Amino acid sequence: MAGGSILGGLLSNKTRYTDVKALTRQILTHLKANRLKEAVSILFASPDCFSYSLYAHLFQLCSSNLDIIEARKVESQLFGACPTPPTFLSNRAIEAFGKCGCLPDANELFDEMPLRDGGSWNAMIKACLQCESSEKALSFFQGMHKEGVCANEVTFASALGACGDVLELCLSRQLHGLVVKYGFRGNVILESSLVDVYGKCETMSESRRIFDEIESPNNVTWNIIVRRYLEMGNKNEAVIMFFKMFRAEVRPLSYTFSNALVACSDMRAVKVGMQIHGVAIKIKFDEEEVVLGSLIDMYVKCGNIESARRVFDLPGSRDLISWTSMVSAYAMSGRLREARELFDEMSERNVISWNALLAGYTRFLQWKEASEFVYLMGRTAENINRITFQLMLNVCGGLSDVDTGRQIHGSIYRHGLSSNIVIGNALLDMYVKCGNLRSAAVWLRQMKQSRGAARPMNSSGIIVSE
DNA sequence: GTAGGGTTAG
């Protein structure tokens, strides 16, 4: 266009070049100060291509800030200024889109790439994982295999992660074979991923066998094995592995404390929990928020509220999670006034904190307080969830308020939760407690029908050929 | 200018 050429004529190539240099310096200053938006707006001051490393940095910051808007802007300036950017930059963009949870953006870019390398496939597989599309991740893994692109350690780590999400034991075993075949044994990350995926697929004996073969498990490996025992219901072994980690002189992750303490809670083993508390003090983990929060919850679940409170009153232990544990402790032990006081003092709350107090009101049949609280919740709390609906139905049952119960029933439909079995039972219970047996019978029939219709789908069944 | 594993509260 004429306007464009006039404007273009005003700028000689030389001034343009120095412009880019000066602009780059400005952008870098903003990037260092985490001012992404400002950095990106300066990017658009020039129609020219900046250095590739600058774009890489920009995408990286978009990823860590989870800022999809800026990521899209960077991509658009990049492709406007330089029609065929190097593959690695497109890979960075895919990673940023994935990290921001925008799989369609990632997929579109991937499809349009004239040239892909292994990193492109890895980025795409990872993007699927981050967007909770593990089935898709596995089909990309399969596609990569079909196109003859060689999988590397990174590919296998992601693919195993996807298998863990969809509980694909069969594919996991095949991947395990490939990991060995490609000579990746001894890679502690991949071996840890194998421990993880076998544990998730409920084959703890295989998980443990791999674990025992690892030459030097690191803190993540230990965290995985403790966690998997915990989730498989073997609390005792979870705790045993926790103490074993210390004999191996591996410095734990704070979440490993959490997992071991949850195991103690489940076993009501407060004495073991106290030993773990002692360990935390000894290795100076007793100032970490996550560990303190987990200690509080352990004491709460073991019924030792005063010990929990002592930890809660320590400096640095009060965050949303520990605060919610404490509210729950008072609420579920019937100390509703104290629960309410603590709740009112909270500087931030989420749906879990709200539910914690509501659960106390319903457990102790405080229907009046409960319904007032529900009203307040409807006006103040941002999101309510499945648990909230369940508790609200209990309140309706307690008050014999079938009209509100029906409204909640409608709301449950709109939230797509009506096929949930726990919610279904809560609805049934509500209708019965309200004395409305006809509605109860109608709902029961519907539940039976929808359960017949909604059979669980089998997972992908993807097979990798050797 | 490159890639990867773990997550406590209702």
Image: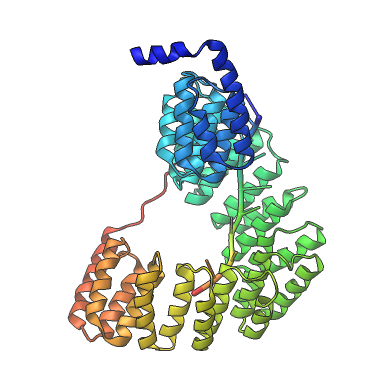
**Residue A138 visible in rendering:** no
Q: Quadrant of the C terminus of chain A?
A: top right
A289 over A131 or under it: above or below: below
Residue A96 appears at what percent x and percent y? 52, 38
Residue A9 appears at what percent x and percent y? 45, 10
- Name the one closer to the observer, A262 or A182: A262
Left/right of residue B10 with respect to residue A397 in the rendered view: right
- Name the one closer to the observer, A69 or A303: A69
Q: Specify the farthest residue to the left.
A: A438
Point 52% across, 46% down: residue? A163
**Residue A352 visible in rendering:** yes
Point 27% across, 67% down: residue? A411
A153 over A301 or under it: above or below: above
Residue B10 appears at what percent x and percent y? 49, 74
Q: How is the image coloured?
A: rainbow
- Name the one closer to the observer, A391 or A171: A391
